[in-house]
Amino acid sequence: VTERPYHHGNLRNALLAQAARTVRQQGADELSLRDLARQVGVSHSAPRRHFPDRQALLEALAEDGFARLGAELQHAVETAGPGFAARLRATASAYVRFATDDAALLELMFASKHQTQSDALHESAERAFSVMLELIREGQAAGVLEQGEPERVGTLLFATVQGLAALVTSGMLESAQLDGLVGDAVAAFLRANATTATPRSKA
Amino acid sequence: VTERPYHHGNLRNALLAQAARTVRQQGADELSLRDLARQVGVSHSAPRRHFPDRQALLEALAEDGFARLGAELQHAVETAGPGFAARLRATASAYVRFATDDAALLELMFASKHQTQSDALHESAERAFSVMLELIREGQAAGVLEQGEPERVGTLLFATVQGLAALVTSGMLESAQLDGLVGDAVAAFLRANATTATPRSKA
DNA sequence: ACCTGAACACCGTTCAAGT
DNA sequence: ACCTGAACACCGTTCAAGT
């Protein structure tokens, strides 16, 4: 909490924090390294020590994003009410909330530019998605979902949730409708992937 | 087919064609107006007559994209086999094909940057989506889909299809799996939104 | 180890001027 | 009506040099 927070050890963190703010508010396209350095009070070539180029900074942002996404999904699972459907709904809602609150960051996280994908980025993505895969396994163990690779079983629900977020981001859907649609999607998913046919069509 | 195709009337079209190529191959971020002018053989300020700024060019590309998307969806509906399910599957498949073949263009089309959204862009988008809305209405008229606003009834299927395309684009899904998943999504959609319960679970 | 400042090759945008 | 060329204010990246 000193007068000059950077110039010493936490320039990297200061850059990431400011960059995250800019990306959220203006999008990744608007992120200028020189501007960033200026805002943080450092010369335009100082960031280079921490991020060899622009792409490296973006990948670090994406990595942080996956870490935060994973934590939020985990928190949603843990605080959800009892019952598999409720847990699945809570997690899906947490996902769309993250996706719509930080649309530009999510875009960055999913950008296929990371061809030279650093292992760190890949691993942080895996960790985030593992929360959802674990939940699918839980549903299978509880006998509510059909058997099979969790990745495959969960694909359609994940796609739907991702698509709903995209529709909100692009302005085609009101975010007020989101929770209802997520609930519908989860319900349809549970019906479509049930192991045992339990057609209580009136409940 | 003369020696110098532009410098006269079709500079606008030449720019759009070359820009579409670049966007498809390298993404919209890599599109440079100066480079474009160079490739088309014109001074760097010539494009300004046709597109006041970079954003205007991108919007024109998006508009063309919607026109092409609409045409492809329409073609899919018209050449699909008989039966509502088949028509819906064909249209959804055409959509994901477009979305994955031209991912960067689709991103441009959906970009929320068009805040100052030109009416032309908005209208071309409406026209493209009207093909799908019309198909939903057809299903309602045939008694296969529940009543209600087509926009609302079709939302979840549209989100799923959009999400599937996003997963392929981001490398999380093999495009070989797409057709099967689209079929699953359409089947689940028809089951979830049927008017009359026809649970022939073995057919 | 970490940061600075000049330099290079690019941008998008503007504008007077050419035909 | 359509295009050119110089100019301006920005970029990302590089590199010798400072502490």
Image (cartoon, coloured by chain):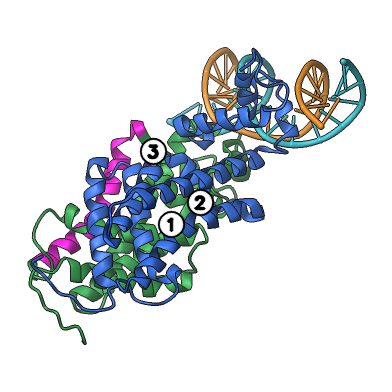
Chain colours: A blue, B green, C orange, D cyan
Q: Quadrant of residue B40?
A: top right
Relative to residue A117, is residue C1 drawn left or right? right
Q: Is residue B125 magenta?
A: yes
Residue type for callout 3: Asp
Foreground mark, 1 or 3, reads 3
Please, what secondary structure does the residue beneath circle 1 have? helix
- The image position of residue A110, as x and y in percent, is 50, 51
Residue type for callout 1: Ala
Task: Give the residue number, with chain letter if any, for mark 1.
Answer: B166
Residue A101's disc is 3
Furthest residue toward bottom: B202
Q: Residues within 10 Å of mark 3 (few under 14, many from 20)?
A: some
- The image position of residue A138, as x and y in percent, is 38, 66
Is disc 1 in the same subunit as disc 2?
A: no
Image height of A188 relative to A169, above or below: below
Q: Quadrant of residue B131?
A: bottom left
Parent chain of label 1: B
First-in-chain label (2 vs 3): 3
- The image position of residue B116, as x and y in percent, is 34, 30
Residue type for callout 2: Phe
Parent chain of label 3: A
Q: Are marks 1 and 2 in contact (CB under 8 Å)?
A: yes
Q: Is residue B22 visible?
A: yes
Q: Main secondary structure of the magenta part?
A: helix
Relative to residue A109, is residue A154 drawn left or right? left
| Stretch in magenta | B115-140
Parent chain of label 2: A
Task: Give the residue number, with chain letter if any, for mark 2.
Answer: A110
